[in-house]
Amino acid sequence: MIAYLQGKLIHKSPNQVVIDTGGVGYCASIPLSTYFQLGEVNEPASLYIHTHLTDSALSLFGFATREEKDLFLKLISISGIGPKLSLNILSGIGPQELEEAVEKNDIARLALVPGIGKKTALRIALEMQSKLDKKEKVLALKGSPETEDLMSALTNLGFRKKEVETVVEAVMKQAPAGAGFEKLLRECLGRLAKL
């Protein structure tokens, strides 16, 4: 599977690019946001790639940033939204604006994207919200090595991941600076025992 391409840009249009990597030209579909971030033809270029395989085709989708690629993957995981529509969405609304529209449940803004009706906009808002919430939780929990050690230790002891995440998050918020791992682990175990 191709995940990243780096080479010379030999063709560029608003929805497609060809990058020459070691004498092989890879064609990738791109959103407008990526098009504007790429340099001119014959300049070096790099893209994060999603390789999409179906019964009839192998397609490459390219993105200037990892954030764009992550949003694309979240969009195609929504029922009824394929890669082409996902690219269309990312071309009609920037990654930051898309996340804000989803967080604020701004159906009207999402429905302004060509090819998106109100029903699809509502489905995007609902399904993307849960995906973005998970991302925020993971980012919040991955803050410190102690947090990751606690999560690992508690899940290895057989506690369910959801309970562990909730308890570790609460303990870390209230933990005094410099609290040792053992003290934090005891506190987590005490809270988990009460659940």
Image: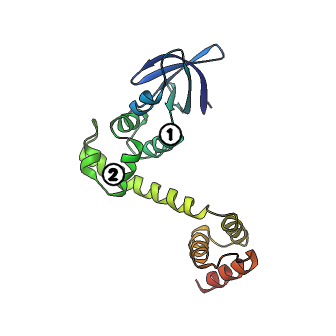
Type of residue at label 2? Ala
Query: Measured from the top left, where is residue 157 in percent x and y?
Result: 73, 73
Query: Measured from the top left, where is residue 12 in percent x and y?
Result: 45, 19
Disc 2 secondary structure class:
helix
Q: Nearer the viewer, residue 116 or 68?
A: 68
Query: Measured from the top left, where is residue 42 in percent x and y?
Result: 53, 14
Type of residue at label 1? Lys
Pick the quarter of the image with the C terminus. bottom right
Disc 1 secondary structure class:
helix
Quarter of the rendering containing residue 170: bottom right
Q: In the visual, does 193 lie left or right of 61?
A: right
Q: Nearer the viewer, residue 135 or 84?
A: 135
Query: Measured from the top left, where is residue 4 in percent x and y?
Result: 60, 31
Query: How many numbered marks appear?
Result: 2
Quarter of the rendering containing residue 194: bottom right
Q: Residue at x 36, y 38 (%)?
A: 89
Q: Which residue was labeled with disc 2?
A: 101
Label 1 Cα crowd, 10 Å radius (few <14 / some 14-19 / many 20+): many
Q: Residue at x 49, y 16 (%)?
A: 41
Label 2 Cα crowd, 10 Å radius (few <14 / some 14-19 / many 20+): some
Q: Where is 55 relative to 43, above or below?
A: below
Q: Which residue was labeled with disc 1?
A: 69
Q: Nearer the viewer, residue 134 or 183?
A: 183
Pick the quarter of the image with the N terminus. top right
